[in-house]
Amino acid sequence: MALPKWHRLVGTLAFAWTWLALAACEAPETRRASDPDFGAATQPPTPARFPSIEAIYAAVNDGQVTSVDALIDYLPASFFGHFTLMHESQSQHGASHEHPRLLLFGSDARFLMAIGTDPSDPNVDVVEIAQLDRETGLWRYRDVDFGQQPPRLGRDDATCRGCHGTPPRPIWGSFPRWSGAFGDGANLFDDADTKAILRIISEQPDGGRLHRLRFQDPTTVVREGHFILPARVDGRANVAFNLDLSAAVADSLLRRAKQHPEYPRIRWALLQRRVCDYESANDLIAQLGLDGPNDFQLGERIGDTEPGSYRWNTGTTGLDRVFALAVLADTIDEDAMLRARLDPERLAEFERVHWLWFESTGAQREQWQMYEFHINLDSLIPETYYVSLSDGLCDYVADKVGERGAIGSAQLRPVRP
């Protein structure tokens, strides 16, 4: 999507600052796992600005990162402002209030990491990683086993598909329930959560693998109080992960859908159904090669999903509606005639909200979260989010659908007056 001038200026300044910072750093000496002194690093690893699978694997191969603790030191400090904790887990990590599983999701949930903390867990030294490939739209799942020396680097996602699906996608509860998470009921602490969080805060900065986490003021950690991330203006931890993940997964689904040869035709029918008529478009989504249980039901492991359902509650709407909004933004960006029909001021506000919540990534998104990211959740409810565009939008969409006729077995109707 084309960004307003002020967004492009911020992006240019952020890029220039990052480039200067990187240019001022000396490249670390290359070291290999076969070197006799591999693992005997003389200085801490150079922190990553924004982590990636490639960067972590390179740091492991070069001997900079040889343990989970070294990996935690390698990650940028900002990464530890975006997290949640699990006291129960169906993953390969054990989890409890005494030894929670740590989920790091960064500023935009395009790179996810899970770390165990229970020393009695046989997989405590295995770190799980998921990263969105923004070229293919697919999620890449990998793991690093620091229990072996040199560490074993996972080469594919074959072992992940049994739970995460094919192609794999993240698993996270549907708002407002996140089974097994701290604050798993509407993001509110219960007694066990409260006791555990206060203990973890009291142990910092010597809190083992949790020592770099940025916690809220301990005076706010009370029963029925919210789990808050101070790195964000609106920092309800589990809600934040829901919203960020909905944007990341919608990004993934859009990139995959656009690779389908029928996307240019089907998207108009999808917009009419899901955006203009508020009706199901599941059959059209399926025609784009996307699968409801596998791609949309993020709250369930594969095998526990509901056949035919595309529902996952982001906190303001369903994931299928967020996907439709991503298709809408993409279509507005590509169709000059549609843009010309929309009110400029309303379009600018639509693009501002959409960019902030669903397209900004990395350092830019981090800045908005820290200082300006507070948007009332009501503005993200689809009926509020795009309704100001509906007059010029839906008539144009109906015309496009009329040009293309029936799609599949469903005869497409004109929009409601």
Image (cartoon, rainbow, N blue to C red):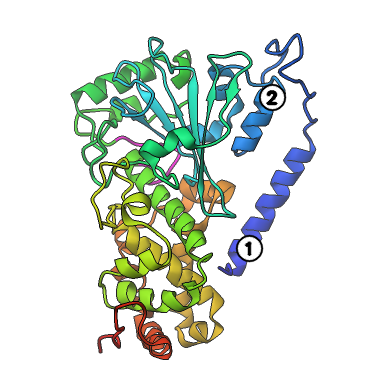
Q: Nearer the viewer's eye, disc 2 or disc 1?
A: 2
Question: Is the stretch drawn in magenta largely helix, strand or loop?
Answer: loop
Residue 47, compared with residue 416, is above or below; it is above
Residue 379 pos. (x, y %): 33, 63
Circle 1 sits on which residue? 8
Q: Position of residue 371 (x, y in %)?
A: 48, 48
Relative to 27, residue 94 above or below: above
Q: Of the residues shown, which amino acid type is indicated by label 1?
A: Arg
Q: At x 40% / y 43%, what residue is drawn?
A: 170
In reply to whether residue 352 is colored magenta, the answer given is no
Q: CA distance from mark 2 to mark 1?
A: 37 Å
Amino acid carrying label 2: it is Asn
User: In this view of the protein, which residue sits in the foreground, 390 or 77?
Assistant: 390
Q: Give the class, few, some or many, for how many residues have Cα within 10 Å of label 2's Cα (few <14, many ≥20).
A: many
Asked which quadrant contains residue 402, the reply is: bottom left
For label 1, the crowd category at 10 Å Cα-Cα, with few meaning under 14, some 14 to 19 and many 20 or more, is few
Could you tell me if residue 360 is visible in this image?
Answer: yes
Where is residue 201? Give x, y as percent. Answer: 38, 20
> In the displayed structure, would residue 23 be above or below residue 341?
above
Of marks 2 and 1, which one's residue comes earlier in the chain?
1
Q: Is residue 303 left or right of residue 201?
A: left
Name which residue lies at 34% across and 41% down.
172
Kind of element beneath mark 1: helix
Q: Residue beneath label 2, please?
A: 61
| Residue 51 visible, this orientation | no
Asked whether 209 or 224 is in front, the reply is 209
